[in-house]
Image (cartoon, helix red, strand yellow):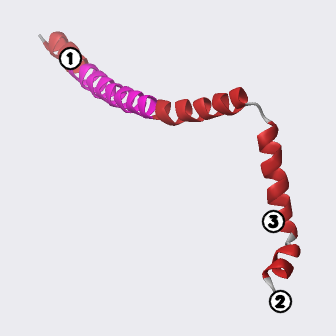
């Protein structure tokens, strides 16, 4: 079996991949560039969003702790005023 015979028989998967590749070439360069820029923007923006969510969670936790202590201390002060 020579090289010519081996390349003549292609798997259906290879034919399908080649057909998909040809369809990708049909897209214009501007469409491909736009798609690439969108993917890069999505990849880069996730870091800012994650950092913002972490900072917001920390601030929310501090606010909850502050509110807890504020409410506990304010009720103790009210009791002291009533006793006097």
Of residues 37 and 54, the one drawn nearer to the viewer in this rendering: 37
Residue placed under numbered mark 1 in the picture: 79
Q: Which residues are magenta?
A: 47-73
**Residue 36, image x and y in percent?**
61, 34
Residue placed under numbered mark 2 in the picture: 1
Res 79 quadrant in image: top left
**Residue 3, image x and y in percent?**
78, 80
**Residue 30, image x and y in percent?**
69, 26
| SS class, disc 2 | loop
Marks 2 and 3, the one that precedes in the sequence: 2
Q: Assign the magenta stretch its main secondary structure.
A: helix
Marks 2 and 1, the one that precedes in the sequence: 2
Residue 19 lies in the magenta stretch: no
Q: Which mark is residue 14?
A: 3
Query: Separation of disc 2 and disc 1 at Cα?
Result: 99 Å
Of residues 77 and 52, the one drawn nearer to the viewer in this rendering: 52
Q: Is residue 82 left or right of residue 10?
A: left
């Amino acid at each position: 079996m020579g090289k010519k015979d081996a390349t003549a028989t292609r798997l259906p998967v290879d034919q399908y991949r080649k057909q998909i590749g040809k369809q990708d070439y049909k897209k214009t360069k501007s469409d491909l560039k736009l798609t690439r820029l969108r993917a890069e923007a999505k990849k880069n923006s996730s870091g800012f969003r994650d950092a913002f969510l972490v900072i917001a969670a920390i601030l929310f936790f501090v606010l909850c702790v502050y509110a807890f202590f504020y409410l506990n201390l304010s009720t103790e002060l009210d009791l002291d005023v009533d006793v006097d």
